[in-house]
């Protein structure tokens, strides 16, 4: 494998401001040109009102060895998305990787609240942000991606198809959103496969995103301090881990073997041999089933 296997390739990471989207800056380490989009810029914050910006993510791509391009985009606005894709077409003439990681629902769902008690406006807004945005982006971006054989679409979600099928995920709206993204990858696999492209669903494990670290009152440098309160957090992973999963998929000439499938960062680490930043290979979804959900004490032995 060459040191930069994605040199000359072009990627669009839709929803790259923070979390998994920012971790996908690992595409830069593989040499790609990466267009990163989101609603929070250095000049304007989104409704999240957080400090992370798409310009910061673009800088990380460039620092890693690729070329990052920040494009402010509201993916609920079809005209803005069309303009984004037109820009990529004019500047690059190709699109090799589309990562649909748009989310924006962290403050909109209510844990363990039935649909009739859940705030309806927030629930419907969550579905628009988590589902409609992906459909709009795919509608406009896929004709460009299909111009070059071997394109890859990655639908980022929370949970594998196997895990989510038998488990209630937080609330009616959250559950529906994540299941919808899994199904989108399946449907896109049927539509893209015969046309020479591949679509997959990909989930990180327990992600040490900026929001999650803040929630536990820790930083990446001392994240283990949270284990006294949340022992199973020991299986968590950095956003760069799922980024390395995307980079490995994008560089795999035989990636079509995964078409339409539900994948995880931990599962792909076993296939491709990449690690998280600390050299470990956390396999969160297997751990959650066999340890956390089974009611066992936290012990990551054999799972990272």
Image: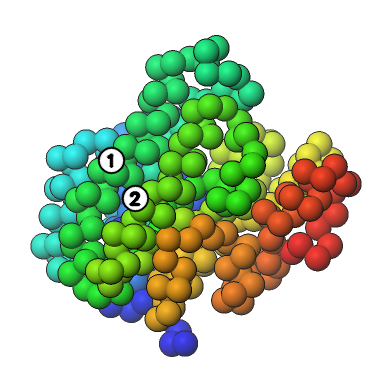
Q: How crowded is mark 1: few (under 14 residues within 10 Å), some or many (20 or more)?
A: many
In the rendering, which numbered label is found on residue 14? 2
Callout 2: SS: strand
Residue 53 visible to an observer of this rendering: no
In the rendering, which numbered label is found on residue 75? 1
Could you tell me which residue is drawn at 40 percent across and 54 percent down? 185
Left or right of 281 in this view: 93: left
How far across and down, in percent of the image, does residue 66 sit? 36, 70
Callout 1: SS: loop
Decide: is 128 above or below 252: above
How far across and down, in percent of the image, does residue 63 sit? 42, 67
Residue 193, by quadrant, is: bottom left
How far across and down, in percent of the image, does residue 211 sit? 56, 38
Residue 193 visible to an observer of this rendering: yes
Residue 129, by quadrant, is: top left
Could you tell me which residue is drawn at 46 percent across and 65 percent down? 246
Left or right of 288 in this view: 122: left
Could you tell me which residue is drawn at 88 percent across and 46 percent down? 297
- Seen as rendered, the residue at the extreme top is 117
Q: According to the image, what is the colour scheme of the structure?
A: rainbow
Left or right of 219 in this view: 225: right
Is disc 1 in contact with disc 2, using a CB cutoff of under 8 Å? yes
Residue 94, by quadrant, is: bottom left
- Seen as rendered, the residue at the extreme bottom is 2
How far across and down, in percent of the image, does residue 293 sit? 77, 43
Which quadrant would the C terminus be assigned to in this image?
bottom right
Q: How crowded is mark 2: few (under 14 residues within 10 Å), some or many (20 or more)?
A: many
| Relative depth, front residue between 234 and 288 | 288
| Relative depth, front residue between 9 and 67 | 9
Q: Distance between the residues labelled 1 and 2?
A: 8 Å
Decide: is 243 above or below 79: below
Decide: is 203 above or below 108: below
């Amino acid at each position: 494998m060459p040191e930069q296997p994605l040199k000359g390739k072009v990627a669009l990471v839709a929803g790259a401001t923070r979390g998994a989207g920012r971790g996908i800056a690992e595409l830069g380490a593989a040499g790609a040109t990466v267009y990163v989009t989101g609603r929070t810029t250095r000049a304007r914050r989104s409704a999240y009102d957080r400090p992370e910006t798409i310009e910061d993510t673009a800088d990380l791509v460039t620092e890693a060895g690729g070329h990052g391009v920040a494009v402010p985009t509201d993916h609920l606005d079809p005209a803005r998305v069309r303009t984004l894709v037109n820009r990529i077409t004019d500047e690059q003439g190709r699109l090799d990787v589309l990562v649909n990681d748009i989310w924006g629902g962290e403050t909109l769902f209510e844990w363990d609240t039935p649909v009739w008690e859940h705030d309806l406006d927030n629930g419907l807004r969550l579905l628009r942000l988590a589902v409609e945005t992906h459909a709009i982006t795919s509608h406009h971006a896929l004709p460009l991606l299909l111009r070059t054989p071997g394109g890859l679409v990655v639908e980022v979600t929370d949970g594998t198809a196997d895990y989510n099928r038998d488990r209630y995920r937080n609330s009616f709206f959250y559950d529906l959103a994540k299941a919808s993204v899994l199904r989108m990858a399946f449907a896109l696999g049927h539509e893209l496969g015969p046309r020479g492209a591949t679509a997959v669903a990909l989930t990180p494990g327990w992600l040490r995103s900026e929001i999650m670290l803040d929630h536990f009152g820790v930083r990446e440098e001392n994240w283990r301090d949270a284990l006294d309160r949340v022992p199973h957090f020991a299986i968590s992973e950095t956003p760069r881990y799922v980024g390395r999963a995307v980079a490995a998929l994008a560089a795999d000439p035989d990636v079509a073997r995964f078409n339409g499938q539900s994948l995880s960062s931990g599962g792909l680490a076993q296939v491709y041999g990449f690690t998280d930043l600390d050299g470990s290979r956390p396999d969160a979804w297997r751990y959650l089933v066999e340890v956390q959900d089974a009611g066992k004490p936290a012990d990551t032995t054999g799972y990272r």
